Image (cartoon, rainbow, N blue to C red):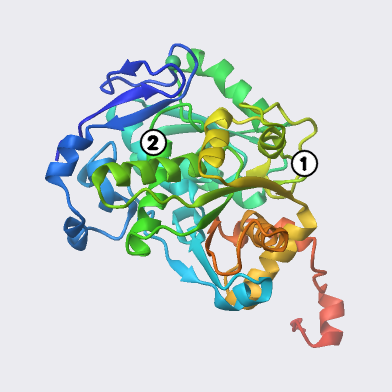
Amino acid sequence: MGNSYQLCCSVCDRFYDPARLRNLCECGGPLLVAYDFAKIRREWGKSALQSTPSTMWRYDPVLPADRASAISLGEGWTPLLPAPVLGAAIGARDLWLKEEGQNPTGSFKARGMSAAVTMAKKLGATRLAAPSAGNAGGALAAYAAAAGVEVHVAMPADVPQANYLECEAAGAHVTLVNGLIGDCGRIVAERSQAEGWFEVGALKEPYRIEGKKTIGYELAEQFDWELPDAIVCPCGGGVSLIGIRKAFSELEELGWIGSKRPKMIAVQATGCAPIVRAFETGALRSEAWQHAHTLASGLRVPKALGDFLVLKSIRESRGTALAIGDAEMLDGGMELARREGIFAAPEGGACVAAIGKLIASGFLKPDDRIVILNTGSGLKYLEAYGTRFIRNTAGEADKLGGLITPR
Ligand SMILES: [Zn+2]
């Protein structure tokens, strides 16, 4: 099936032909994909989903490529799990978990990179590059390996070990930077022209968000086209939050859902909360957060390119934004593991803490249908969770009977 779309600037509404490899609009604004819904609506219906693969490419009429040409590792169509035991503990009687930790490379970043690498390769890029706070780099490395293209990733030197190792394992060229993702982004941008790299940083090209938006399509389909009352999203670069909202407006254009929208709730870390501050002050854009620190590495984004789109999405959905401390996040993550058996990223743990606060304040009601977007697996964050446990050394464990040392 031929996909019919144009690229449209999210700032100045200028249109571009998608046949050429492109980063931002001339004005510097992120480009978004605008489909011809009149055409898609005639050719595609819900019933077509019965014979589609269990990946995000089941929605390929609203993706930039068809599934036959996709670079896919089986991303998407992750479980939507009820969380009744955790829900009872935190006062949310209709609580659900979108378990993105089950994606290839253990995080939701797989979706965006599947779409971005597919399109970059199709349009002729041979060397890809991106800055990453952690999981995006790992996902990019994996999809670039699957596509057979060269890849360069710049990451903060203190990125979780798993993210560094998965990049190296997949053959990526990794640059560790004494700084944050913004510093990594500057280095990638400075070197891209000379090195012939195509940048696939968040919102720096039009297709990562297309992959990410499939979370919204899946939530709608998995809830039988009745959207929940609230979606609680960890917010670093904010692409999933924007993407989910994009999915919902597209679904309404398709006539598959009505006008009801969930409140979008952005969760950040107290050590890096630029969106929360901008939301609270009524600003249209965020200001770069100074001395950003949090062990939820995915939330360590001091200034997001799409901040204005995130803030617009939160406000239009009558949602909110709040920040959670690192200790509360880890407690939330362990609560989720203990009560539901899902070992979540600290970002997912932050959502648990956020819901507790929002129920207590009355912003969320106990009977609201609430979805936690767990963006990744806790297994990628062993150093962070390790701060909560003292591991027995061999000698100690001997005494406790916990570890057998060969004699
Ligand atoms: Zn523009």
User: Residue, x 68% and y 60% (percent of image)?
Assistant: 362
> Which quadrant of the figure contains the N terminus?
top left
Asked if disc 1 is less than 8 Å from ligand 1, the answer is: no
Q: Where is residue 276? Give x, y as percent.
A: 69, 40
User: Residue, x 73% and y 40% (percent of image)?
Assistant: 272
User: Can residue 143 be seen?
Assistant: no
Which element carries disc 2, helix, strand or loop?
Answer: helix
> Which quadrant of the figure contains the C terminus?
bottom right
81 horizontally vs 300: left or right: left
Q: Which mark is residue 8?
A: none
User: Residue, x 29% and y 40% (percent of image)?
Assistant: 63
Q: Amino acid at mark 2?
A: Ala
Distance in Å between CA atoms under marks 2 and 1:
29 Å
Q: Where is residue 352? Give x, y as percent.
A: 65, 62
Mark 2 crowdedness (10 Å alpha carbons): few <14, some 14-19, many ≥20:
many
Mark 1 crowdedness (10 Å alpha carbons): few <14, some 14-19, many ≥20:
some
Q: Nearer the viewer, residue 343 or 320?
A: 320
Circle 1 residue: 293
Query: Which one is earlier in the sequence, the residue at label 2 or at label 1?
Result: 2
236 horizontally vs 73: left or right: right
212 horizontally vs 290: left or right: left
Which element carries disc 1, helix, strand or loop?
Answer: loop
Query: In the figure, residue 146 lies in which quadrant?
Result: top left
Q: Amino acid at mark 1?
A: His
Residues under numbered marks 2 and 1 in contact, where contact means CB atoms less than 8 Å apart = no
Q: Where is residue 98? Give x, y as percent.
A: 48, 61
Q: Which mark is residue 116?
A: 2
Q: Quadrant of ligand 1?
A: top left
Q: Where is residue 154? Give x, y as percent.
A: 60, 32
Query: In the figure, residue 227 lies in which quadrant?
Result: bottom left
Query: In the figure, residue 66 lies in which quadrant?
Result: top left
